[in-house]
Amino acid sequence: MTQARALRADAVRNRKKILAAAGEQITAHGPEVGMDEIAAAAGVAVGTLYRHFPTKTDLVAAVVAAYVARVADDAESVVARVAAGARAVDELTALLGRVVEASVTDRAVKAAAQTLGAEPGDRADEDRAGAAVTALIRAGQAGGDIHPDVTVRDIYLLFSTAPTDQPPAARARWLTLVTPGLTTRTRQAVI
């Protein structure tokens, strides 16, 4: 029993190392990075990588799924903070900023997913993220801070059109410019 658990823990540890290395390598070298390079960066044998991920498409789909899970966890934490008294509009703006900044480094992973046709098979994390963002929007609308016509699809549109290829100052300016489209606040001029 102990040996089976040790093997299972080792397998889990290897999978995490492979996913982390894949994200780093695809970001650094693009979707054409080889499985050999990913295995070497993870510190595992190529056979170990292929036992976990039989194809590169499977590996990229898992990296994308891990990213979606992180976004879902963050969105659920935001909803909990709003339930504890934080302002929904402030939390939504901060979430949008965090996702955009995370997308800067994960941009190559997303490009690889599109290139290889990889999509996470299990949509549970995407559904969790959508439900949390919907709850956040509704809380902001109930508080009068978020426009009544804003939907989760609008937030996804903003995520997909964010200037992730621009420098930090441009991304910050983008957030300053799009926030009034979501909120009932008026934008103050930045001097």
Image (cartoon, rainbow, N blue to C red):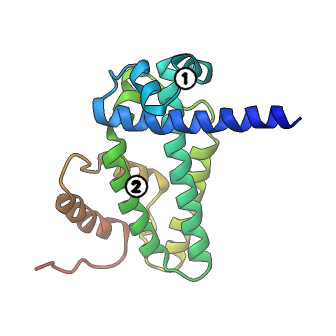
Whether residue 112 sits left or right of residue 58 in the image: it is left
Where, by quadrant of the figure, is residue 96 drawn?
Answer: bottom left
| Residue 119 visible here | no
Callout 1: helix, strand or loop?
A: helix
Which quarter of the rendered picture does the N terminus lie within?
top right
Of the numbered discs in the image, which one, if any, rests on residue 49? 1
In this view, the residue farthest toward the left is 191
> Could you tell me how far apart the alpha carbons at marks 2 and 1 are, in whole angstroms?
28 Å
| Above or below for 177 versus 56 | below
Where, by quadrant of the figure, is residue 34 drawn?
Answer: top left
- Residue 116 image point, x, y percent: 41, 21
In this view, the residue farthest toward the right is 1
Q: Earlier in the sequence, mark 2 or mark 1?
A: 1
* Residue placed most toward the observer, 60 or 146: 60
- Residue 77 image point, x, y percent: 58, 66
Which quarter of the rendered picture does the C terminus lie within?
bottom left
| Residue 27 visible here | yes
| Above or below for 169 versus 3 | below
Of the numbered discs in the image, which one, if any, rests on residue 99? 2
